[in-house]
Amino acid sequence: MPLEPDITLPSRDQLVAIIRIQTEIARQGLDLAQIMSVVVQRSLDLIKAEGAVVELSEGDDMVYQAVSGIAAGQLGLRLKLASSLSGLCVLSGEIQRCTDTETDERVDRAACRRMQIRSMLVVPLQHEGSTVGVLKVMSKNTAAFDERDEAVLGLLAEVLGADMFLAAQYASDDLYHRATHDQMTGLANRALFFDRIRTDLSRVTRDGSEFGLMIMDMDGLKAINDNHGHRAGDAAICEVARRASQTLRKSDTIARLGGDEFGIIMQPTQGMAYLAEGVERLRQAICQPFQFESNWLQLSVSIGAAIALKDGLDLDALLEHADQAMYQDKRERKRLLNLAR
């Protein structure tokens, strides 16, 4: 009699998909943040999940470092290691599966309800013999994952764990630093920026201490890339990052959010007038010519600002306020430039 196929093993299509994911990861080089982003995006289709997260452990917390699907708005979210399924996965080093979050005592039920999660599958990420984080998939339906999904996600976690090891092996800093900082500029990355905003918003809720938020976007980067090449464009991004970092205080946070967009948390601040002064200091420091090889390039930025408490305590609303202010600044600067011609 022919042997019955083992339904707990990944299918041929899933194995091919994992190989393709590995190829895509290889293109990212040693950029750990990008590697994690690829994995959570591809996990959705690989096992038909509705959301996926990579969480790394930091002290007593599990921190969302890469997100996709229904978890997309939760970058930087912190859960207590001792009271979450992800924490149990890290502590035990074993795969954890939840069929119904409403009846499973191991989960952070409040967090699950916020994201409408009813079932999860969590696999450990190993680095140098220790479990440093997890790859987690989630669904709005109960009992959405089975043994085959465990096998598939386990293989993907092995791929990610190996690349985490390689990404950290050639770095002078630790794994968590590699996962939370931009490879090109050395600034905080998007995940760390959102983590710090969430922490600061919690403090505002507790004691009313406000903080300032800026969104900063480079002007004219496309022209630099078109006229001088992408090496010049990358150098311009790094120079903006350097000038901004030197202008800000040690208590402030600057992050590269992606491309030529930066986010800044000014902590503490004393009202909008103080924040406006900070905006002008940044603009004056950055908007000076910059020499790249034999060419002088003009650097320019548009900046929008918001204050937590005055402009709201909702993360998305606060970011939207600063973002819209930045676009208004960009439109006004273009208008003045056209009038001057």
Image (spheres, grey):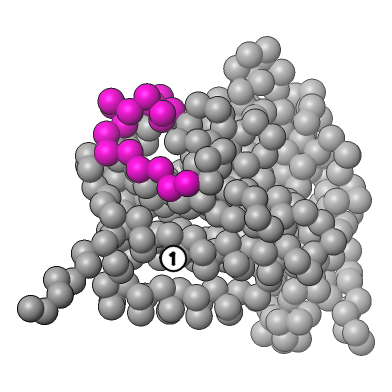
**Does the segment drawn in magenta span residue 103?**
yes
Mark 1 secondary-structure assignment: helix
What residue appears at the point 75 percent right and 24 percent down from the top-left corner?
A: 271
What residue appears at the point 41 percent right and 28 percent down from the top-left corner?
A: 106
Of residues 231 and 78, which is closer to you in this image?
78
Magenta segment boundaries in residue numbering: 94-110
- Magenta: main secondary structure: loop
Answer whether residue 53 is visible to the viewer in this image.
Answer: no
Residue 1's image quarter?
bottom left
Residue lying at the far front of the rendered structure? 1
Of residues 66 and 125, which is closer to you in this image?
125
In the figure, 14 relative to 295: above or below?
Answer: above
Q: Report the side of 119 relative to 190 (left or right).
A: left
Of residues 70 and 245, which is closer to you in this image?
70
Q: Amino acid at mark 1?
A: Leu
In the figure, 25 relative to 156: above or below?
Answer: below
Q: Position of residue 265 (x, y in %)?
A: 72, 38
